[in-house]
Amino acid sequence: MARADQRRIEKDLNVLATFNSTPGQGLTRLSYTKEYRDAQAYLRTEMEKLGMSVRLDAIGNLIGRLAAGFPEEGQPGCEKNLNEQKEKPQETSMQPALAVGSHLDSVRGGGIFDGNMGIVCGLEVARMLQENNVRLRHPFEVIAIVEEEGNTFGSGIMGGKAIAGTLDESLLDALTDERGHTVRQVMQDFELNPASIVTVKRSSGNLAAFIEPHIEQGPVLESENLSVGVVDTIVGIRTREIEIVGRPDHGGTTPMHLRKDAVTAMTEVICRPRQTVEGLDDGTVLTCGSIRVEPGTVNVVPGKAVFSVECRSRNQESLNLVFEQVGIVLDKLREQGFVVLEKPLMELAPTHLSDRVTAALRRGLSTCGFTEKVLPSGAGHDSMCIAGITDVGMVFVASRDGRSHCPEEYSDPKDIADACNVVFEALMELDQIFN
Ligand SMILES: [Zn+2]
C-alpha cells in the first residue's frame, strides 16, 4: 500500500512558511507579492522534479500536471529516469484531469497550514504516484489557487471563482489594495494578463474531479480524537443586519412599562431563533457577533440597537426556519411601535459536494483503517465555487484547539500524512469510475 511520507510534508510546509512578510508574527503571504512569487517558485521546482508540466493561468493559479499513464518506466518523471529527463510526456488531447489543491495565499498574521496544507498534500500524492509507479488513466494536477482569503482587495475566492467562470470581471477595476492599485494593475505588475481571465475557466470536460484537503479550522475532529474527516457539505450562510429604533429616555425617571427599550427588543430577536436552532439536530449555528447601541450611556434607556444575525447550516430549510422566527419577532416589535429595518449582508446557499467523490473519500478512510467521519464545513472555500463546474470533494485534517487564521494554528504532520493516504486511495477509485 502506498504511504505518504510525513518528513516530506513537514519539509514542504516549513519551506513554504519562510515565504512570509511578517516573520515572528504569523504567516502573511498576500497574493501577487514577492513572497507569493517565491512560494510559487518553490512549488514549481518541486512539481518539475516530479516531471510535471507547470503553467500559471491568467489570474495566477499555478498548475502542475502529470500526463495520463505517468509515470511509465522509461518515461520522463519515472524515478529511474529523473536525472536524464529530456522531454515531457506528450499528451495527445486535453484529457480531463483529476486534481488536488487549495489556496496559496494567507490572511495577515495567520498560520502556515491554512491553504498550504492542501497544496502540499497534492504534491505528496504526486510523489506517491511516482514512487509506487502508479499509472493513472487521467492526468493528475496539483493546483495552487490564488487570492482566496481576500485580504488584499477585500473580496475572497477570486482564483476559485475564475476557475468556475463566475468571477465578476468588473471587480478587477472596482477593487483596490491599500495603496489604491486596482486588481488589474496589481495583476499586470505580477506579469499576468487580466484581459484573458476568461481562459482560466475549467469545466468537467478538462477537470474531471477536484479534491481540496484543508485544515478543519474547528474543534470537531480533535474532540473525537480523529485525524481526518470527509466533508460532504459546505454550509449555507444567511446574514442580516437588523436595526431597531425605540426611544432614548431617562434611565431613572422612566417607569419600565413606559419604555421603548431597543436592547430589550433586540434580546428577543436573538433568543427566539436561538431556541429554534437548539431544537434542530443538523449542526445549524447562530451568531450575533456585532452589536451597536445608541446612545450607549449607562443611565439612558437605549433608543437604538444595530446588530447582526448570522445563521449557517447545511440545510436550506433550517436557514429558512430560523429566519422565519426572526421575522415573527420583528413583526411583533413593529406592532409595539418600534421601527425595524433589515439589511441583507450575505446570502449563500449550502453547497453539497459530489456524492461520487465523497463516497470515494469515505472508502479511502475505511481502506486506511480510519473512522468514516463525515462533517460539514462551516467556513467557505474555493471548493464551494469549483463545485459548480465539476465533481468536488473535501478532506479535513484536525486543527489543534480548533484554531486557525492565527500563529497558533497547527495540524500534526502525521495527521496530514493520513489525509494524503486517504486522498491517494480515493484517487485510485476515481481514476476508474470517471471517463
Ligand atoms: Zn483556507
Image (cartoon, helix red, strand yellow):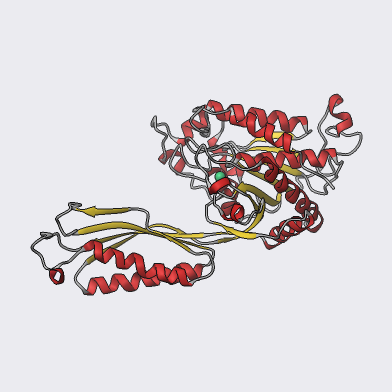
Quarter-of-image position of residue 352: bottom right
Find the residue positioned furthest to the right: 74
Vertical placement of residue 178 versus 102, above or below: above
Vertical placement of residue 70 versus 347, above or below: above
In this picture, residue 365 sits left or right of residue 131: left
Percent x, y of residue 428? 80, 52
Residue at 25% from the left image edge and 65% from the top image edge: 264
In this picture, residue 240 sits left or right of residue 96: left
Q: Quadrant of ligand 1?
A: top right
Residue at 88% from the left image edge and 39% from the top image edge: 72
Find the residue positioned furthest to the left: 253
> Could one spot residue 96 in this view of the protein?
no
In this picture, residue 353 sits left or right of residue 154: right
Work out which quarter of the rendered image holds the C terminus and state it.
bottom right
In the depicted view, which residue is nearer to us: 308 or 14? 14
Residue at 34% from the left image edge and 53% from the top image edge: 290
Vertical placement of residue 57 versus 402, above or below: above
In this picture, residue 351 sits left or right of residue 426: left
Percent x, y of residue 220? 58, 56
In the depicted view, which residue is nearer to us: 34 or 338? 338
How many numbered circles are shown?
A: 0
> Could one spot residue 292 in this view of the protein?
yes
Percent x, y of residue 226? 66, 53
Percent x, y of residue 3? 80, 44
